[in-house]
Amino acid sequence: MKFLKLAALPLFLAVASTANAQIAVSANDNKVVLDNGAVKVVPNPPPDTVSIIDLSSMPPKLVTEIQAPASVVGPPGSVAVAPDESYALVAAAMKIDPADPTKQAPDDKLSVIDLKSSPPKVVDTITVGKGAAGVSINRAGTLALVANRSEGTVSVLTISGGKVTEKEKIKLGEANSGPSQPVFTPDGTMALVTRDNDHKISVLSVQGDKVEYTKRDINAGLRPYQIDVAGTGEVAVVANIGIGQGDADTISLIDLKAKPPRVVNTVSVGQTPEGSRCRRTAATSP
């Protein structure tokens, strides 16, 4: 979910996917502002931050805010919380360009935040791929995927004993294909990765920590971006954000039971449907 502060400061928010989730994590990009519709770099900006929010109280309360690189570039899923709420992963797609402080350049950092420490803190920073954007953790909490928007790859990370390690990168398309958001199926045997610049959704097979690109690409709509899978694992919903010319945009329903998975319905919605979310418990069928 993305929000704008009064100063046009974007945030990303992730909530633990368990039924009794009590933690939300917000990544706050302090490098840019929105000025009359144009993104501008802030001169000498303060550090980006990550906010840890306690959802068990009403109203929710801020537990702490810590420094960590973040970016508004990429889908709302640029933050992921572990199923057991023990850690969070925060991707940083962009940074201030070292050669020109008035511009941004692709970043490749993924922060690992220990949510169980008091207060929560960054315990590791991992180098993944350029333009690290959407991130997803499987239900077992043993594997994560990061979509690297600026190099056409997805990073595969193994998680064991509190340690997150990049195992490999998988090439999905050209460097400008724009991998945006990965998502695992509930059983952990498949993952989908949106590619908003060449309008495809890549299908990955997952067996343990072995992840392979099946070479199967689903074609849903213009610029598939945010994607989510229903709790039953039967369907996925993808938001196709279009090209920003004022046209009606779409969301598509993907049948994951089909072999191979395929789009079974597409409906028009409002402009730029950037976020999409499926219910985790209700049975869903196309």
Image: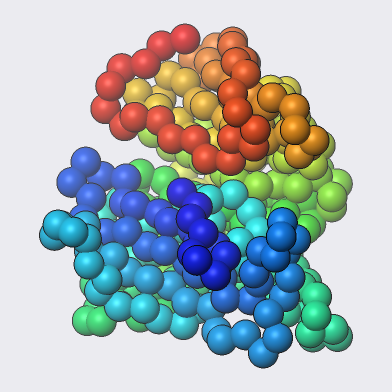
Quarter assignment of residue 29: bottom right
Quarter assignment of residue 239: top right
Q: Residue furthest left?
A: 57
Image side of residue 56 versus residue 126, left or right = left
Of residues 131 and 28, the one nearer the viewer is 28
Measuring 57% from the left and 76% from the top, which residue is drawn there? 30
Of residues 143 and 122, the one nearer the viewer is 122
Vertical comparison of 141 with 258: above or below: below
- Pinpoint residue 174: horizontal percent, then vertical percent: 86, 46
Measuring 66% from the left and 72% from the top, which residue is drawn there? 32
- Pinpoint residue 112: horizontal percent, then vertical percent: 44, 71
Q: Is residue 27 visible?
A: yes
Q: Is residue 90 visible?
A: no
- Pinpoint residue 100: horizontal percent, then vertical percent: 85, 84
Image side of residue 121 versus residue 44, left or right = left
Vertical comparison of 110 with 188: above or below: below
Measuring 69% from the left and 24% from the top, which residue is drawn there? 248
How many marks can you see? 0
Q: How is the image coloured?
A: rainbow
Vertical comparison of 190 with 19: above or below: above
Image side of residue 73 versus residue 163, left or right = right
Measuring 43% from the left and 72% from the top, which residue is drawn there? 50
- Pinpoint residue 177: horizontal percent, then vertical percent: 80, 45
Of residues 16 and 258, the one nearer the viewer is 16
Q: Residue furthest front?
A: 36
